[in-house]
Amino acid sequence: MTNNVVKVYAFCNSGNGTDMQTWLAMAETGEVITSHFSLSRYFGVMDVSPQCKWEAYEECLGEGFEVDYIVVDAGQAPPAEVVAANSLLRERSQVIS
């Protein structure tokens, strides 16, 4: 079986530079894999990493994948196409539910 390489972006969604930060790991497909409240950038990057949250990654991405784990610069969001994919997923879920 060939492994699929999935880009996953780790970024701070709120509180960047404060004592409490909300960190997300979002796949290039727009799916949010996991999130975590962290006390710092250092801990946030680790808290949503595949090493700490492997079960969440496997549940979201299935088996037979590799993660290209990309930490986004402080204060930045993932690439625009990833955010757009996330918005599309949200819109589709609102129509279904």
Image (cartoon, rainbow, N blue to C red):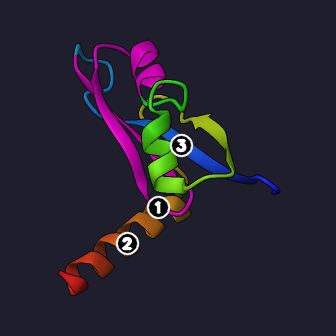
Query: Circles 1 and 2: CB distance less than 8 Å?
Result: yes
Q: Secondary structure at mark 1?
A: loop
Q: Mark 3: which amino acid?
A: Tyr
Q: Mark 2: which amino acid?
A: Leu
CA gap between label 1 and label 2 equals 7 Å
Q: Residue tagged by mark 1? A: 30
- For marks 1 and 3, the one nearer the N-term is 3
Q: Secondary structure at mark 2?
A: helix
Q: Mark 1: which amino acid?
A: Gly
For the point 55% across and 54% down, which residue is it?
A: 79
Residue 34, given in percent of the width and then of the height, sits at: 37, 41
For the point 63% across and 49% down, which residue is it?
A: 7
| Number of marks in the rendered image | 3
Q: Residue tagged by mark 2? A: 89
> In terms of image quadrants, where is residue 67?
top right
Q: Which residues are magenta?
A: 20-47
- For marks 1 and 2, the one nearer the N-term is 1
Q: Residue tagged by mark 3? A: 9
